[in-house]
Amino acid sequence: MNQTIPIASDHGGFEMKQFLIGKLEAVGYTVRDYGTHSADSVDYPDMIHPLATAISRNEYPLGIILCGSGNGAQMTANHHTHVRAALCWNVELAKLARQHNDANILTLPGRFIPCDLAWEIVQAFLSASFEGGRHTRRVEKIEQF
Ligand code: RB5
């Protein structure tokens, strides 16, 4: 596999991030880890903004972010132009986020789902594709206001 996946979390998503990095690398992805690098308390925007900036600049097609609930990370990322960060806690939501919303960042709630489920969600997100069609018009309207 020749794709780099950027990933970022605060302390609330740190353990799950480390688990997912291991899984991603085991199946052949290259991972760019934007931190955090320990379980010490940090402020999620400090890790999420740099990753979201890279996605906004098209440096990577897809990324993964985590915090305890997922909300703070998602809210931070969605301030960036061309970023569509989707908070997903099951496989179906992850598929729909790609298929219907062309989400380019998967957001996971590190304190509310098990790591094994998070890995299933990641695989679903990375393997699903945007369906286009009527969804293209809707996604374009997200930034038109
Ligand atoms: C950190 O305690 C927690 O607030 C953070 O990980 C996240 O849940 C914020 O939205």
Image (cartoon, rainbow, N blue to C red):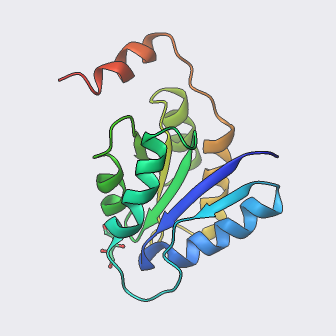
- Residue 87 makes an appearance in the image: no
Residue 45 in picture, x, y percent from top left: 32, 65
Work out whether 21 lies above or below 59: below
Q: Residue furthest bottom?
A: 40
Work out whether 108 lies above or below 102: below
The residue positioned 23% from the left and 21% from the top of the image is 144
Tell whether 132 sits left or right of 4. left
**Which of 139/117 is in front?**
139
Q: Residue furthest left?
A: 145
The residue positioned 74% from the left and 64% from the top of the image is 23
Q: Quadrant of residue 47?
A: bottom left
The residue positioned 46% from the left and 40% from the top of the image is 57
User: Where ligand 1 lies, by quadrant?
Assistant: bottom left
> Split into 4 quadrants, where in the image is the C terminus?
top left
Residue 41 in picture, x, y percent from top left: 37, 86
**Which of 33/134 is in front?**
33
Residue 110 in picture, x, y percent from top left: 48, 69
Tell whether 8 sits left or right of 115. left
Residue 79 in picture, x, y percent from top left: 27, 46
Work out whether 24 lies above or below 141: below
Q: How many marks?
A: 0
The residue positioned 47% from the left and 37% from the top of the image is 103
- Residue 110 makes an appearance in the image: yes
